[in-house]
Amino acid sequence: MAIVTHECPHCRTAHIGLRVAAILAFDAHRGAVHFDCPKCNQPSCAIMVGNGQVGMGSWGSHAGDVAQLNWTVEEFWPKVEGPLIPENLPPDVERVYLQAERNFPVIGNEEAAGTMYRKALDIGLKKIDPTATGMLKAKIKKLAADGKLTADIAEWSDHVRDMGNDAAHEEAPPTREELADLRSFTEMVMRYLFTLPAMVIARKPAKPQT
């Protein structure tokens, strides 16, 4: 079976042999190729270009990577998104947030991503108010009551699963939808607490020298 060695955009396994499932040749040296991943069975597609004499029609008899036949990937779908990190985060918050973002796209890593989003929230909230104690929801409510977060953000926290510090001990992992909700909430809190204040400071006019 012909394969193409590439990162799977779904399970994020690097250098895996994606199985060639279908081919649409544009001409002798270029075409669209559909794959399925032997690990997660999810589909993907690429535009491939051939630099040698072996056409796509000969792939059926080839066992191995078609790179051996001088075919290379020109463009690949779906594209893998890079980590989305709010600007101006404190270094320790950014470090944890990056771990969450690296785990977020990987199917099966929902618990790891959720744990890191919650940890980023916990560290960030402590930096704003070290006196806030209890679970994340309680800390968020306190910051909202003190005017450091909006009431809308506090209300939103009531609808986000896994906001408690004991969530890591639950047996059922978060669904993709629940994780996406936690991700959006965490991003909003981080931007409100750190990104927006830094932007306001940056836009303040310089004080005239006396």
Image: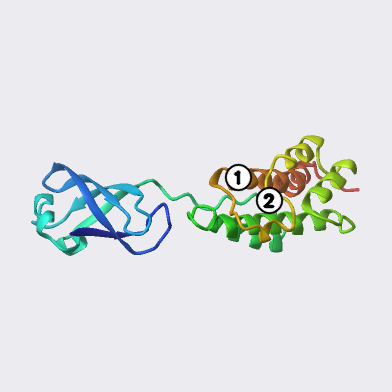
* 65 relative position to 86: left or right: left
Question: In the drawing, what numbered circle is on residue 91?
Answer: none
Residue at the outermost top position: 152
What element does badge 2 sit on? loop
* Residue type (three-letter) at the residue carrying disc 1: Glu
Residue 62 position, x and y percent, is 13, 61
Q: Position of residue 108 (x, y in %)?
A: 50, 57
Label 1 sits on residue: 178
- Which residue occupies 81% across, 42% down? 149
Mark count: 2
CB-based contact (under 8 Å), mark 1 and mark 2: yes
**Position of 193 compared to 78: left or right?**
right
**Label 1 or label 2, whichever comes before in sequence order:** 2
Indicate left or right for 63 with 117 as reference: left
The quarter of the image holding the N terminus is: bottom left
- Comparing 202 with 104, the one in front is 104
Q: CA distance from mark 1 to mark 2?
A: 9 Å
Where residue 196 sits, quadrant-wise, is top right
Q: Position of residue 16 (x, y in %)?
A: 33, 63
Looking at numbered disc 2 in the image, what kind of residue is underneath it? Asp
Which residue is nearer to you in this view: 47 or 11? 11
x then y, percent, for residue 167? 69, 56
What kind of element bears circle 1?
helix
Instruction: Using a 10 Å C-alpha cutoff, classify the residue at mark 2 as few (fewer than 14 neighbours), some (14 to 19) or many (20 or more).
Output: many
Q: How is the image coloured?
A: rainbow
- The image quarter containing residue 114 is bottom right
The quarter holding residue 60 reads bottom left
Q: Nearer the viewer, residue 167 or 6?
A: 167
Q: Which residue is mark 2?
A: 162
Residue 63 lies, with reference to residue 187, above or below; the image says below
Quick one: label 1, few (<14), some, or many (20+) residues within 10 Å? some
